[in-house]
Amino acid sequence: MAAVPAAIALAMVVYPLAFNIWQSLHVERLSKNDGQFAGLQSYSQLLQFGGLLDTFRTTLLWTVGCLVLQSLIGFIAAVVLDGMSRAASIIRALLLVPWVMPGVAVSAVWSTIYDPISGLLNSVLGSLHLPTHDWLGDPKTALASLVLVNVWKGFPFWMLMLAAGLKSIPQEVHEAAALDGAGYLKRVRFVIVPMLRPVWVLTTLLAFIWTFNYFDLAYVMTNGGPNGATTILAFDIYQSSFVFNRFDQGSALSVLTFLTMSIAIAVYFRASRRLGGGAS
Amino acid sequence: MQYTLRRGSVAVAMLAAGSLALAACSGGSGGSESSTGSATVTLTYMTSSPEATIGAEKDVIATFEQANPTIKINVDAGPLSNYDTQLVTAFKGGNGPDIFWVNHPNVQAWANAGYLADLTALANDSSQFQKDKFIPGLLQIGTVGGKQYTLPVNTDARVFWYNTALFKKVGLVDSSGNPKVPTTWAEMQADAALFKKAGVYGFAYRSDSDYAMAYEAVGPFMKTAGGEILSSDATAQAIASQSAGTVAAVTLLQDLVKAGVTPPGESKMNETTMNKLFASDELAMMLGGPWERPSLEQIAPDFKFGTDYGVADVPVQQAGDKTASTSGGWQLGVNAKSANPAAAEKFAAFFETPENLQKLAVAGSFPPTIDGLSQAPFSSDPFYIPFMDVLPNSGLPIPPVAQMAQVSAAFEKYAMAAINDGKSVSDQLSAFDNEVNSSVLGQ
Amino acid sequence: MKKSAFVRGVETALVGVLLLFALVPIYWMATSALKSDVELGRLDPSWFPESATLDQFRAAIGQSRILSYLLYSGLLAAGTAVVVVILGSLAAYAVTQWTFPGVGGFLGVTLFTQLLPQSAVLVPLYLAWKTLGLTGTLPGLGVAYVFLFLPVGVWMLVGFFQSLPKELTEAGLIDGAGRLRILFSIVLPVVRPALGAVAVYTVISCWGEFLFALVFLRSDHATSTVALASLVGEHNPNIGPLMAAATLVTLPPLIVFFLMQRQFIAGLTGGSSK
């Protein structure tokens, strides 16, 4: 019963990883020498010319920024709606809309919102006598602008996960806490948050990986610019492989990404096990 | 319990219905299902044109199918976005369409990787292909290592666009009251200053893609000054910082930005915004290709060519220099692993007749032939006069190399740093040369 | 839970802000879809269309195959979701009920399936699919989607299954029920919201997926995201039809979720944990 998904999972890890490792050790750049063994040349080129440190930094800023804001907004939405049974279903469906929109559509719509001359955001700011800006064209604001779009798109997922987790808290626990005299906010802090921990951990792990690897916005809205301000690892990999045809470098980057994230996850698991907690 | 059972049966029903529907839909893998019984060959033809403009291509295909009843052609009109990704992934799997459009920067790499069939025999067969009618530079793009791998489909050029009302407003008119269009860079800069005083933007340039600097913004001016980005000899080294024309062109744009005559958002300026400003009489001058006209007609049908705006030759560095511009365009390739190479080449030859190419070019690009613009529908339209002027001196800003995308992206990065951020032009172009020579070319 | 009037007031304000945040861009998209090309070409954006027109929708439908692609997207998403929920709950149940060695390893492998980005998986998956003859067909892409989304579905369900109190299943075991019956009669109704979440996750992931659909399918049977992308021209971003198509693509899942929400609430109020 667990065998089929396990086999699928194993295949989905081992095969692409092996493929990328192989490709990163050979020449693969749509040239006449494709297939030749190249050793660690791609890796050394990456380290020398790849601007990896900047890319890693940008990726971390992007991921952490998105996660923190998405989880916060999602949590607030889930908790607030949990108590409002009648209107909640309609409101929740409405709040799901950003998540339901395909990334292609989101990029198109938000590009027109951020347009410095005829965009909605600058128009609203202008009418409120607030300063307008070239949001996507200024290296200082480009990444934050993309983060806002991804938070808008992704908070409903958090809301959904946390809402399902809230529903799984048995009513008796709430009643027991109420009997103990705990007020609403205290109940949120000492009952809801701890009982949501397994779901929170799960969602964080998933959202971290997904956000880390999500490059659609960086590709369509800013093409990694301006000046590399939105060049995250996943974008770098796509650009190296499919725009510059440097499949060997793209694979090397993918392998490095995989290693980095594996180490991060392993460290996280060891730390949580040592602290005696954790649901996995 | 009730709910679970209902859910279970709903799920099973959906699964069954879904599988049936999907199975019924899955017929499109290009097999030769010939109902006539004869050996019908099915080719797949892939194009980058959106459905809206693909009509002319479909007409050509229909004519060919009528003349060749044993060959059927399926049209695959994929999205332009990630067009190269679609094709390269298919090629890597040994798949891919039989005949397809190739964007000119990809020809070298795809030929090197063995994706493109060798069309040299076809190109040299004068009964099938009229080689001498084509612009030599475009044939050159399709040549790799002395062999012809693609044939030209279309080309383009950028010229100078000006807003008539604004020119009249600041008094830049000649004796008959027509706008006095700048012919040199210095005149253009002086005019831009006048527009700034009048409270509008003097000049805008595109910067929304990896190719914008090389083809749209710096390139045309660079070409008029005889500048180069890569040396055009066999070594193909990056020489942007040593090419006086290139340095001058980048400096020209940098000076325009410093003079404050450009609109905000120039680090990511696209054609749509430029057209909006232009049609709203907020922007006086810009460079653009023939495709701007249909876009302008769409958003401002009352803003007409001739009365409200005009086009002219690209201003030159010194008075008396010849005008020039940048050109690109698409090519046609045949899959090296095609299951029906003979039929594919036959179609390619039919497609590549000057008459058919002329029909395709009306949607905002030019035929790849030497006398294409001097025939209908271009010859009778005064809009095309400046294009006819610049086309003979037009060419690629970057000579064909396998790493064109990377070179272009690097040029975009360093040129924008100089133009938008005011950094030293020679420093940025030297950095460009170093980066390209050490880590891009020869790889 | 009883809440004070103050808390309820704050909550209402928060809901209002959230709704504004989520819906203003949607409103912008929908109204842009109703504006004419000329109005979209103006420098100053307008909040209401001057004279609402359906031209952009007509253009979107005429210039792309969005209507048929919407159907294909729907079939693909629904089919994949069903497979993922069924296989996923079976696997998650097995993993949580039987503490066999390697459970942690299995979960770890699941997590590792997500680490490689799309760009790294695209070519190897395509090559494998080509060998299996699955490229160019909708079911082939469906299988790929199952491969891509099942691991996370299992992972999600394991998380929820693990937070179930043991008393539930033990009560069933004492009654002499077999494992599968326990799964269907006792566990599944309780974790209904989790199943819903996994189904929703799978449907959304399939619905919005672009790169694999673009590369694995041919233009006679493609998905709605491909239709959206196909509207953008080389020099004309085609904003009007693009916004209309984006609106069309957003509607179906929205309607489905709205309907499903009610079923959830009905199921929950009839369930055993509350």
Image (tube, rainbow, N blue to C red):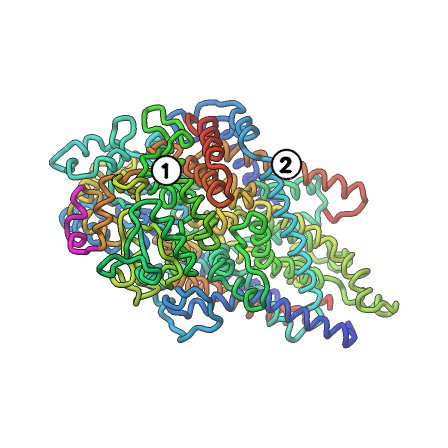
Q: Amino acid at mark 2?
A: Thr
Q: Which residue is mark 1?
A: B91
Height in image: B393 above or below C187? Answer: above
**Relative to residue A264, is residue B270 drawn left or right?**
left
Residue toward you, C166 or C12? C12
- Does the rendering let one see residue B435? yes
Viewer-nearest residue: B383 or A85: B383
- Can you name the residue that lies furthest to the front here? B175
**Which residue type carries mark 1?**
Phe
Identify which residue, C140 or A227, lies in the foreground: A227
Left or right: where B403 falls relative to A164: left
Q: Position of residue A92 (x, y in %)?
A: 61, 68
**Element assignment for label 1:** helix
- Which residues, given as a range, are shown in magenta? B370-382
Q: Residue at x 60, y 72 (%)?
A: A90
Asked whether the beta carbons under mark 2 and mark 1 sit within 8 Å of each other, the answer is no
Q: Name the chain letter of the residue that bears numbered label 2.
A: A
Task: Identify which residue, B291 or A158, lies in the foreground.
Answer: B291
Kindly tell me whether residue C121 is visible in this rendering. Answer: no
Task: Assess whether residue B381 is covered by the magenta stretch.
Answer: yes
Residue that label 2 marks: A260
Q: Residue A253 at x, y = what percent?
A: 55, 35
- Residue at image coords 22%, 52%: B384
